[in-house]
Amino acid sequence: MNFPIQRHRRLRSSAAIRRMVREHTVSTDDLIYPIFVTFGTNVKEEIPSMPGVYHFSLDRLEEEIKEVQALGLPSVLLFGVPEHKDGVGTSAFEENGIVQQATRKIKEWAPELLVIADTCLCQFTDHGHCGVVQECGHGEAVIMNDASLEYLVKTAVAQAKAGADIIAPSNMMDGFVQAIRKGLDEAGFEHTPIMSYAVKYASAFYGPFRDAAHSTPQFGDRKTYQMDPANVREALREAESDIAEGADILMVKPGLAYIDVLSQLKQKYNLPMATYNVSAEYAMVKAAAEKGWIDEQAVVMETMVSFKRAGADMILTYHAKDVARWLKG
């Protein structure tokens, strides 16, 4: 028998030993902080379902960016809430679209801060879907795949022109990576990486985000283009397609509920892996902490480590500022 020769508790006997043999750690370099920018002036409004997360107008955005910098966070992910919406999401790809304006401002205030632009149409369309819609009669409509690619390419190019360091397409249209890669290259942005939302599930965990981004579909759902939560092999096929089309980073979304999928992708592919700790995963922790049911710091840090253990090289999370404060001690 191995026992008592093998006593695994020897390596747990003190905090110093536990730190020395720890297999995975979290640092601020792992974190990407999502920010919601909106139209108007003097806007800093807390999102009710996401305590501690705000809508910022451009004139209030600098204070948030300065705090992000002071905490040592290396990167932000921008989502825009426009003033005007239409059927094709025109404000997503306008030169002075809200994300483009915010990107230029951030690059003035904090040139070294990495700006990642979410590339989708759902916040900018009046119907709330991630692509353009075609009416089919009898009150039915279809989200058109190939027709949507044109507008997604325009959006990605406009974001890159504004100074976005990474383009992060989240729309889940077939062929979106190839179309955006071609569009960026032709516009002279061949060195701009694509962080693909390669594996994005049709999840119930997006509810608070849709409130924040004002992007709830006005009809139907997104199950014809986002993935079925029951499927894993399909996730591998999606990732493989995006790699072949030119993705530089792969993302799994949501994070905590699909950590098994992240682990499988990490084992199979050698691209950097990102995971998105999404809005409801955040909101549930905040709600339980407010009730005093959990130790918020302990739960969040355990969650972050679980992402690293599963293979995440980067973590998109609304907890990023809190995590940075805790790491600073």
Image (cartoon, grey):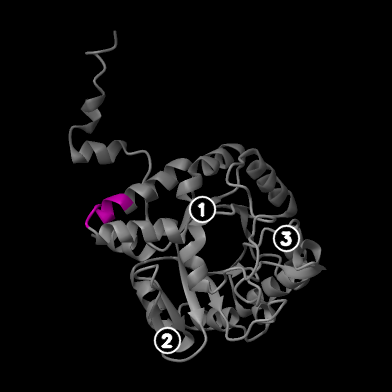
Q: Is residue 13 above or below residue 169?
A: above
Q: In the visual, does 68 lie left or right of 143?
A: left
Q: Is residue 113 visible?
A: no
Image x and y of residue 75, in percent: 47, 66
Quarter of the image that includes the N terminus: top left
Question: In the rendered structure, which disc, 3 or 2, sits on the residue that comes first in sequence?
Answer: 2
Q: Secondary structure at mark 3?
A: helix
Q: Is residue 162 visible?
A: yes
Judging depth in this view, the residue of 294 and 15 nearest the camera is 294
Q: Secondary structure at mark 1?
A: loop
Residue linked to disc 3: 176
Question: In the rendered structure, which disc, 1 or 3, sits on the residue that comes first in sequence?
Answer: 3
Q: Which residues are magenta?
A: 292-299
Residue linked to disc 1: 254
The answer to the question of whether label 3 and label 2 lie on touching residues, with beta carbons closer than 8 A, is no
Dot 3: within a 10 Å radius of its alpha carbon, few (fewer than 14), some, or many (20 or more) residues? many
Check disc 2 and give the amino acid type: Val
Judge depth for marks 1 and 3 and give the one in front: 1
Image x and y of residue 167, in percent: 62, 66
Image x and y of residue 94, in percent: 68, 83
Question: In the rendered structure, which disc, 2 or 1, sits on the residue that comes first in sequence?
Answer: 2
Check disc 3 and give the amino acid type: Phe
The answer to the question of whether label 1 and label 3 lie on touching residues, with beta carbons closer than 8 A, is no
Check disc 1 and give the amino acid type: Pro
Dot 2: within a 10 Å radius of its alpha carbon, few (fewer than 14), some, or many (20 or more) residues? some
Quarter of the image that includes the C terminus: bottom left
- Which residue appears at 68% of the width and 79% of the height? 93
Q: Secondary structure at mark 2?
A: loop
Judging depth in this view, the residue of 273 and 51 nearest the camera is 51
Residue 168's tag is none
Asked if residue 211 lies in the magenta stretch, the reply is: no
